[in-house]
Image: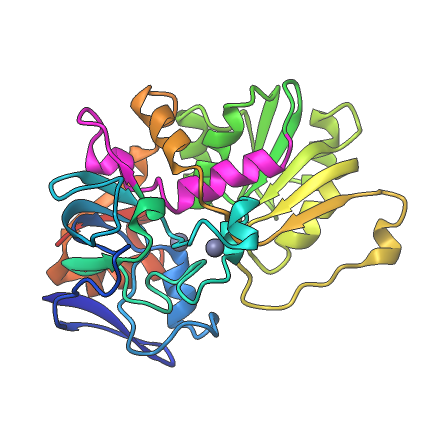
């Protein structure tokens, strides 16, 4: 079968690989029906994800059909349409029992798919802990609507949740890329008074506004960000800041636009160290929450998609077959043709 393989030091290629098979009673084999490229794949390509293993098949954001299950799998059966969670997790270790599945201590726990074990930029994929990592897709939900459930939607849902957004808050979201837009969509679920979207890409900001995800859009370098956020919030600053950009100075912007005692959630993945200027932020009494998604709420996300309350299928701006995925990588990495997300069919 065809699969996208990471070879270390910037090299990724589409090649022939053996079909996966069941290795554990908890495994399922999924035939991928729609997959995509995530900015994390580009981080892996750049060598910015040290735990990524050369030789691994990339891809951690995809949907498919279950074709085979191990004897221990109870929740899915062959023929089921499923969304796949970015994280595989045991469900029984110390961290899993507390909902911190990103830190699952099993050897295949946490973000392993498409990083340490073969992922879904391929025709077929083996999913460990299938009962925990697969979410049934209702008949009336399309693959395109379900595609982002396990990764960028989970990230946005988690960010909005740990941001502790309250109705009438002003939420600032830095980054209007795919993850940022998902984060805005999830922040909307909490009825904030206002969502301020910040990005250097005006095309993306326009999309955020057109789709009803952002109320105010600000462009660094053009708008005075701090001043504008203050004027939008009666001089206090954003009540919650969700940083989903991971740019050169976006972390600095995140804490600067936060009001005193705000929660600043950093879900962005940086390629460089960031500076925490404690003297400058003394007295602001900020709470920082950082890291990678605990992606264990896919059932809730799918309910909301099914009910029409979450829909970001508009993010799929380009479509192609798996045979053309290397062109898609080039376009996605270099942000050509205003690409947001590819829908790639194996
Ligand atoms: Zn991702
Ligand atoms: Zn675990």
Check residue 149 for magenta coloring: yes
Magenta residues span 135-164
x, y percent for residue 105: 50, 62
Which residue is found at the position 45% from the left and 45% from the top? Answer: 295
x, y percent for residue 20: 17, 65
Q: Looking at the rendering, in which quadrant would you find the N terminus?
A: bottom left
* Residue sitting nearer the eye, 113 or 305: 113
Q: Is residue 281 left or right of residue 162?
A: right
x, y percent for residue 69: 18, 51
* Residue sitting nearer the eye, 226 or 125: 125
Check residue 235 for magenta coloring: no
Q: Is residue 189 above or below residue 246?
A: above
The image quarter containing residue 263 is top right
Which residue is found at the position 63% from the left and 44% from the top? Answer: 265
The image quarter containing residue 211 is top left
Q: Is residue 220 left or right of residue 13?
A: right
x, y percent for residue 302: 34, 31
């Amino acid at each position: 079968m065809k699969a996208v393989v990471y070879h270390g030091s910037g090299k990724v290629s589409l090649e022939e690989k053996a079909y996966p098979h069941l290795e554990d009673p908890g495994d399922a084999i999924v035939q991928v029906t729609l997959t995509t490229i995530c900015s994390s794949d580009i981080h892996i390509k750049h060598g910015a994800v040290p735990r990524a293993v050369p030789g691994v098949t990339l891809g951690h954001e995809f949907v498919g059909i279950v074709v085979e299950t191990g004897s221990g799998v109870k929740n899915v059966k062959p023929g089921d349409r499923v969304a796949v969670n970015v994280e595989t997790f045991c469900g029984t270790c110390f961290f899993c029992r507390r909902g911190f599945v990103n830190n699952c201590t099993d050897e295949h726990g946490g973000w392993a798919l498409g990083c340490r074990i073969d992922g879904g930029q391929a025709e077929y994929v083996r999913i460990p802990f299938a009962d925990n990592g697969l979410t049934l897709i209702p008949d009336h939900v399309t693959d395109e609507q379900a595609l982002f459930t396990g990764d960028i939607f989970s990230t946005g849902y988690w960010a909005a949740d740990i941001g502790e957004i309250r109705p009438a808050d002003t939420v600032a979201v830095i980054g209007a890329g795919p993850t940022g837009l998902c984060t805005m969509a999830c922040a909307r679920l909490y009825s904030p008074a206002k969502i301020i979207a910040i990005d250097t890409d005006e095309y993306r900001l326009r999309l955020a506004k057109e789709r009803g995800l952002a109320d105010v859009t600000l462009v660094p370098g053009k708008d005075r960000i701090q001043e504008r956020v203050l004027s939008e919030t009666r001089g206090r600053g954003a009540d919650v800041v969700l940083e989903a950009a991971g740019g050169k100075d976006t972390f600095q912007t995140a804490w600067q636009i936060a009001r005193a005692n705000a929660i600043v959630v950093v879900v962005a993945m940086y390629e460089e160290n960031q500076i925490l200027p404690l003297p400058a932020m003394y007295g602001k009494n900020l709470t920082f929450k950082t890291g990678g998604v605990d992606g264990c709420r896919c059932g809730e996300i799918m309910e909301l998609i099914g009910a029409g309350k979450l829909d970001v299928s508009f993010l799929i701006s380009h479509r192609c077959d798996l045979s053309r995925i290397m062109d898609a990588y080039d376009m996605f990495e270099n942000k050509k043709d205003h690409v947001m997300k590819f829908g790639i069919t194996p």
